[in-house]
Image: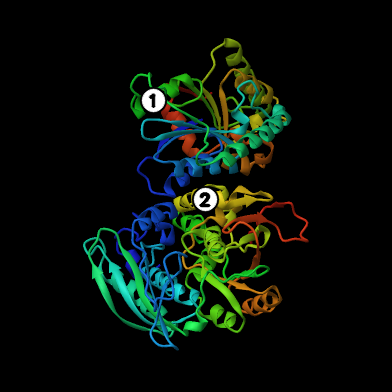
Amino acid sequence: MTDTQRSGFAKLTASIKAAGCAAKMSPTELAEVLRALPSLSSPNLLTGMENFEDAAVYKITEDIAIIQTTDFFPPVVDDPYTFGRIAAVNALSDVYAMGGAPILALNILCFPTCDYPLSVAREILRGGADTVAEAGAVMAGGHSIQLPEPIYGLCVTGVVHPARMLTNSGARVGDVVVLSKPVGTGVGLLGLKGGQLSETQREELIRNLTTLNNRSLEIALRYQVHAATDVTGFGLIGHLHEMACASGLEFALWADSVPLLPGTQALAQQGFVPAAAYSNRRAYQPFVNNKIDVDESLADLLYDPQTAGGLLFCVDQMQAENLLQELQQLEMTSAAIGTFRSGTAGAVEIGVRSGHAETRAEGHDKDG
Amino acid sequence: MIKTADLRGLICPEPVLRTKRLFDDMSVHRVEALVDDEVCVNNLKRLSHSLDASATVHERDGYFEVVMERAEHRHPHVETTMGSALQGEGDRGAARAGTREDLAGDLSAQPIEKQRPGESKEPSAGQRVEAARSDEASKAPGRIGTVIFLAKDTFGDGDPAFSRTLINLFLQSVLQSGLVPRAILLANSGVKLMAPDSQTQVVLQDFQAKGCEVLACGLCLEFYGLKDRIARDQITNMYSIVEYLFAADKVLTP
């Protein structure tokens, strides 16, 4: 507990309805809003809105394109410094998902100055600044306003060589997808708020939420990555669906291989499931085909909105094993979670890895 | 014991958390919760499923009522005694299958009992809760009649064996009088009265069959090494015992 938490004001998360990326507008609502907007294009704009890319990429010269992205949300944890770190890790992730390196960040802060001491705002910003520094970028300012509910995030600029930019649209038949972090942060954060996590489960959750995706991208860039994205508010299945849509392929998910944060499956079983997991399910279920009997709590986690989630790397089957071996040297749990094949564009089939005997995926919660 | 909870206006995960805490008391077999939206409904269904309880959802005017009941209480004809444990197992299995279907039907296709348009205006939450209580008058606390509180396994203090015979005689006499107490609460060495090898076990079962709740203090059962031998739903805590004693019109402590 930090000093600020002892001084009698409400917990940061006390009045927050949805934590982190669980606060995103639902995919259905967002599509409805975006439908009415004109789709703008420019020869230098390398990403369009049509594939729901993680960030905008704009070509400056033949060698340099800038990546521009923003992400912000209400507090996910009560400790302001940790909240700042998580929000920054989450915002920076979009740059990594495009294969780039962040160079510059600006703060976006909404803060109720009447309800919390200024030290809380300072701690949030310090968490953000430390994380931006860790990413090797510069924190160059920002904008703040007073609002009843605290919100924090970043606007981030990154750079990438236009020819080496990663999008979610390049997956090929037979490609294997490697996920660089376990899923379950939405359920885990609800459990944390409800005081349902053991100390080790809490530590593991926070460690996942505050780990940048820079090192896993650095490793992946040594391979021929055909497509990439990061797992955020639309859940693992939502982002796999988008990747499958953009690539015109079908994805076969190995439900038994998806790494889960410790304790989250038990929490989902008991009803600690965020609203966004239900809206994600409603939005993506039409594209999902259950080949096996998927355990309800595992399904919840596959649709669970992720905050500061991992990256999905799409590589040739031959390269997947080495990539995975290298990623497993890092502290996060990573895994090969499925493969692309020809079929209905955007379809996601939930099954198990061929050769595995299970006919029913129960998940595999690491006990913690 | 039945608990009602108005969880409307609470932010996730509070509704599921509070319901979970209510069910943590093993003597609570049924929780009637009011919640705002389908997310809460679905989360309470998941909680019920994990607790091996049923969940029935009623859509009210702008909110939902979720009635959750532990498996062993779902069939009123099954005596909830240690003797019927085998039968209880079977019920639990069936209940589990039923709840799974409910979960699979999720979101849109919920088994929701819609209010008929012609029905009269929905009573207030408070009125409805009261109504639910009077339906289950034999179960819920609140103007609850007589409670027998046994904090030792003897009737008065004297020769121990003789005093234990007297307590058996006391319980038999109450039973034969036809006056059924609302609940029999057992604490300290009183919990030994419901041990499977105790001579009073049978009479306590007879009380249960007549709709009287027989509840034992969990801490006491643990202390006397009896916790594993007593049906889950008969284990309560000091908090509930206090609730019963205050709600009772009369407390008998021989």
Q: Residues within 10 Å of mark 1 (few under 14, many from 20)?
A: few
| Display coloring | rainbow
> At 43% from the left edge and 52% from the top edge, which residue is drawn?
A28
Quadrant assignment for the N terminus of chain A: bottom left
Q: Nearer the viewer, residue A289 or A205?
A: A289
Q: Position of residue A48 (x, y in %)?
A: 42, 69
Q: Does residue A339 appear left or right of residue B113 in this picture?
A: right
**Contact (Cβ within 8 Å) of mark 2 with mark 1:** no
Question: Mark 1: which amino acid?
Answer: Arg
> At 40% from the left edge and 27% from the top edge, which residue is drawn?
B129
Q: Position of residue A147 (x, y in %)?
A: 24, 61
Q: Does residue A269 appear left or right of residue A45 in this picture?
A: right
Q: Position of residue A167 (x, y in %)?
A: 51, 73
Q: Viewer-nearest of labels 2 and 1? A: 2
> At 33% from the left edge and 54% from the top edge, which residue is drawn?
A15
Element assignment for label 2: helix
Q: From mark 2 to mark 1, how far is it between C-alphas?
A: 34 Å
Q: Position of residue B147 (x, y in %)?
A: 49, 23
Question: Mark 2: which amino acid?
Answer: Arg
- Among the 4 quarters of the image, the one containing residue B176: top right
For the residues tagged 2 and 1, is the chain the same?
Answer: no
From this view, report whether residue A40 is shown above or below residue B249: below
Q: Nearer the viewer, residue A344 or B173?
A: A344
From this view, report whether residue A274 is shown above or below residue A163: above
> At 63% from the left edge and 16% from the top edge, which residue is drawn?
B172
Element assignment for label 1: helix
Residue placed under numbered mark 1 in the picture: B128
Residue placed under numbered mark 2 in the picture: A281
